[in-house]
Image (cartoon, rainbow, N blue to C red):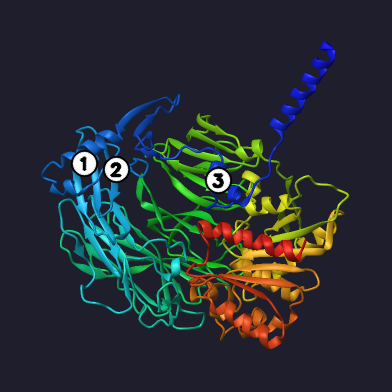
Amino acid sequence: MKRIFFLFFLCSMTTLATFAQEKKAYTLEDVIPGGNNYFNLVPENIPGLQWWGDVCVRADVENIRSIQLKDGKESILVTLEEVNQAIEKGEKPYQLSHELKPLRSLMSVSLPWAEHKVIVFQQNSYWVEYDFGQKKITNISRLNEKATNLDFCKTNEKVAYTIGNGLFVTGKGEESHQINPSQTEDGVVYGQAVHRNEFGIYKGTFWSPKGSYLAFYRMDQSMVTDYPQVNTSTRIATLEPDKYPMAGMTSHKVTVGVYDVKTGKVIYLQAGDPTDRYFTNVSWSPDEQHIYVIELNRDQNHAQLVCYQAATGEREGVLYEEKNPKYVEPQHPLVFLPWDESKFIYQSQRDGFNHLYLMDTKAKGEDTWKNGKLEGSTYLEHLKVTPLTQGDWLVQDILGFNAGKKEIIIGSTEISPLQTNLFSLNVKTGKRTLLGEKDGMHRASLSESGTYLIDNFSSFQVGREITLLPTNGKKGTTLLKADDPMSSQFKLPEITIGTFKAADGKTDLYYRLIKPVDFDPNKKYPAIIYVYGGPHAQLIHNTRFYDARGWDLYMAQKGYVMLTVDSRGSDNRGLAFENCTFRHLGVEEMKDQVKGAEFLKSLSYVDGERIGVHGWSFGGFMTTNLMLTYPDIFKVGVAGGPVIDWKFYEVMYGERYMDTPETNPEGYKDSDLKQKAGNLKGRLEIIIGGTDPTCVPQHSYSFLRACIEAGTHPDFFVYPEDGHNMMGRDRVHLHEHITRYFEDHLK
């Protein structure tokens, strides 16, 4: 009897253990940003890590701690309680202190000066400096409650910011000074990003190294057509137009101004007529005497690096020129060597991949046009140029310098186009030394001297690893090793990557394949291709889940095979890989996605009659195009925020890859999806944000009209007042909606 009871007890315990270990299913709330449980299921991180000169610090809610480079030990530098005590005192001469309210967290503060024990932070309408050595507030600059685009200069302790279309500067104990004319200039914008954030432009103000000047963009878009966006949340719908220059139409005019902090005067660079020109990558010389601008013609096939006198705006001359029969696309400002102010680094794709070139302002070049390695690429060097990196890989970023060793710290794809790895690059010898792990994607920030990195790294095998990494190639101090919490809690699908040949028969394309959860090789599963396919995007990296999104995993749990292919036209494979789509967007990219569909059909467990496709933005264009061009392959599609007709897309991006409708009528006609509206056989749903400023609603509305006239029946869904992407809870709803569509029509 005892033996029977023991066996029963043992079986019961085994059953309980099995239940305890059984992994559960995940929901969209778990895997979609905006979901209630999303942030609990991403690998652990250390927020607030930053450099205070060469001291690594961690700013969290309650305090700021320094971290020892050698062993990771922490010491408290300043506490939230101390800062709030200083705020409550409201000591003179900063009478504005009494208007400050206690901070709730120190996570958003920074420590800009290595030599001073000072933190800076913004609170409502104020920019505040707190000295944790003296334990008091030492500077308060009044902003404005509507201030945006803040740009703090640590060398003069002033803040530039914008309100509406105006540009302002304020400083220690000063009243704000408006740089642009105070009277209204209809359609003129100061101090904001221009050219619709193309060419690497993300801001509109540029402090000089010593803080003596502020360069800024002035954008006159009074001549640009208004696109009539409508806000339907008001009692009567309100017209809220966007300035939107469509391909081939009149674009805005940009000039670069220079504000003298000492005199308050403004001059403008004497660049000539700004009509149909782009002014990009504004840079300062270390001595503040010169401003450099990379200028492009409207065709975007001829770039010039131009030097100007900062004090007068006088144009000194062209230092470097580059041409390409398709397009030249400068993305990076100049970076001067900290140990030699006469030399700077210029980045170019003239040999087919983005590489670094050292230019010497004191030495003349050969001054004759030369051919680049990429077919049709030519360049002219008015000063001496020395290539620093070369090869069939690209430099992605310059993190900074180790001036003591005369090295540049870079991120590149040298090991794999699926990765970003860190290297030190010796300027004199060209030798590169790998920093950190060879595996995965590395995001890093460099200490002031360039001797250490905070390396935040992940790969398919590593959830997250954060290391204080020396730039001499040796091992560092690991601060965090984090597993993927989803792996321990949920039953996950099998994810693999591989390559197959593109439609050209010679180019390798990377793919990511996700099998259904509880995969049965004897079953026949429906499949979905998730697609983007356009420039400046890559969907597959050596990261957690190989970059698969939460929705891809969710659909695998629902019983779908999920495939993604980075087709020709996408990022990080070099210019020839990208620009083979020039003037005919969608054609080559679709051929490669069809190769993906053929790959799916070759798999014994895929039902070749049930293949769907989904994508957003350029991916929405691709989804719609694939459904219409290959209607016998793709049964169901969901296209989000799609481009339908490139004539409706904006000037800078559209004309770079398609030229104008007048110069490329055939290309625009072939990529106009309204012309194919009658081809629709399967089920296609279009989803848009009601006030999308990127792919304006006219794209989808015009397509619906074309389908009505052609007698075809797409479905349509709108997120009122949303833009190009759905955020927060809308994003969860969106993926619920997309899932329902495939469940209803493909499964």
Disc 2 residue type (three-letter): Leu
Q: Residue at x 37, y 41 (%)?
A: 107
Under circle 3, the secondary element is loop
Q: Is residue 45 left or right of residue 113?
A: right
Q: Which mark is drawn over residue 87?
A: 1
Q: Which mark is drawn over residue 103?
A: 2
Q: Residue at x 50, y 38 (%)?
A: 45
Under circle 2, the secondary element is loop
Residue 669 position, x and y percent, is 64, 83
The residue labelled by disc 3 is: 37
Q: What whole-number distance in Å separates the C-alpha atoms at marks 1 and 3? A: 36 Å
Residue 127 position, x and y percent, is 25, 50
Chain-order first, disc 3 or disc 2: 3
Q: Is residue 548 left or right of residue 345?
A: right
Residue at the bottom extreme of this rendering? 709
Which quarter of the rendered picture does the C terminus lie within? bottom right
Residue 387 position, x and y percent, is 51, 53
Disc 3 residue type (three-letter): Asn
Disc 1 residue type (three-letter): Ile
Relative to residue 67, is residue 536 depicted above or below? Answer: below
Q: Which mark is drawn over residue 49?
A: none
